Image (cartoon, rainbow, N blue to C red):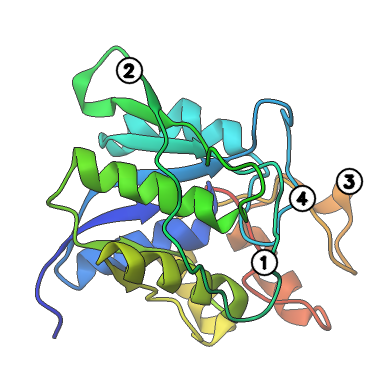
């Protein structure tokens, strides 16, 4: 059994990152902060990213800190996007130091701190995660681990692990390689009220399926061909 650790939860607004954080708590860890990567201001809506889910990112900023009653740290994703798309990610030198700007909400328990993105605009979007987690460690040095909602993407998991290893943090991916039908059912039984806010898979129709909860979509998703059952849905 892993010793209890203080964790920052990577949250995208989706159900997987939330359920992974809840799984960490069930394993004896504590979530003490939230971290979110958002599109740059030049991209107000969804960003095309190999690494990050950004659809509905405005919900994270508006609701997550107050609902969780935890500090929420946010960082803009490098507008350059993915520079390296190989399965395994390496970064030979530390990311450059960045200055940070801070804004706070009205209550101390929901303080939001937003560092800038990498000074080097040529950096891969993964380095935005490095900058964000490095900043959180400086503000909250007690942080020991990071939770993420990775289920099936080696591309994503390898990059989170790369960043964590460079910062001396433990990567916790409790949903990794879980059988997806049973995983989705456990999320439903845990009363995670996630709804579809975008559809981009064969067999899903916006006029019919948008706004449906995962409980309503469970049987439909399980009957679709060539679709991951745990399709991303937002809490």
Q: Using the image, tell me which numbered label, if any, was put on residue 104.
A: 2
The residue pinned by badge 3 equals 207
Give how far apart the Cα atoms at labels 3 and 2 are: 38 Å
Give how far apart the Cα atoms at labels 2 and 1 are: 33 Å
Q: Secondary structure at mark 1?
A: loop
The residue pinned by badge 1 equals 231
Of badges 2 and 1, nearer the viewer stands 2
Please tell me which residue is depicted at 33% across the width and 16% down the height of the picture.
105
Give how far apart the Cα atoms at labels 2 and 4 are: 28 Å
The first of marks 1 and 3 along the sequence is: 3
Rendered location of residue 89, percent (x, y): 56, 74
The residue pinned by badge 4 equals 48
Q: Using the image, tell me which numbered label, if any, was put on residue 75.
A: none
Please tell me which residue is depicted at 28% across the width and 27% down the height of the picture.
110
Give how far apart the Cα atoms at labels 4 and 1 are: 17 Å
Rendered location of residue 80, percent (x, y): 71, 47
Locate residue 211 relative to residue 36 in the image: left or right. right
Please tell me which residue is depicted at 24% across the width and 48% down the height of the picture.
137
How many labels were placed on the picture? Answer: 4
């Amino acid at each position: 059994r892993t010793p209890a650790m203080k964790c920052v939860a990577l949250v995208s607004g989706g159900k997987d990152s939330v359920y992974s954080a809840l799984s960490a708590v069930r394993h004896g860890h504590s979530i003490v902060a939230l971290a979110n990567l958002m599109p740059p201001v030049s991209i107000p809506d969804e960003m095309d990213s190999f690494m990050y889910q950004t659809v509905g990112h405005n919900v994270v900023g508006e609701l997550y800190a107050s609902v969780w009653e935890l500090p929420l740290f946010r960082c803009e994703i490098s507008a350059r996007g993915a520079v390296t798309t190989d399965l395994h990610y390496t970064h030979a030198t530390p990311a450059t130091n960045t200055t940070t700007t801070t804004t706070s909400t009205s209550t101390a328990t929901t303080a939001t701190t937003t560092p800038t993105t990498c000074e080097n605009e040529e950096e891969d979007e993964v380095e935005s995660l490095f900058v964000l987690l490095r900043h959180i460690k400086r503000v909250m040095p007690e942080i020991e681990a990071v939770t993420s909602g990775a289920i099936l993407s080696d591309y994503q998991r390898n990059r989170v692990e790369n960043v964590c290893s460079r910062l001396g943090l433990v990567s916790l991916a409790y949903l990794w390689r879980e059988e997806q039908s049973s995983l989705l059912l456990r999320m439903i039984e845990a009363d995670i009220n996630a709804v579809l806010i975008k559809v981009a898979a064969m067999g899903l129709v916006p006029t019919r399926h948008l706004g449906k909860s995962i409980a309503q979509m469970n049987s439909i998703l399980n009957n679709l061909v060539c679709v991951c059952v745990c399709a991303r849905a937002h809490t």
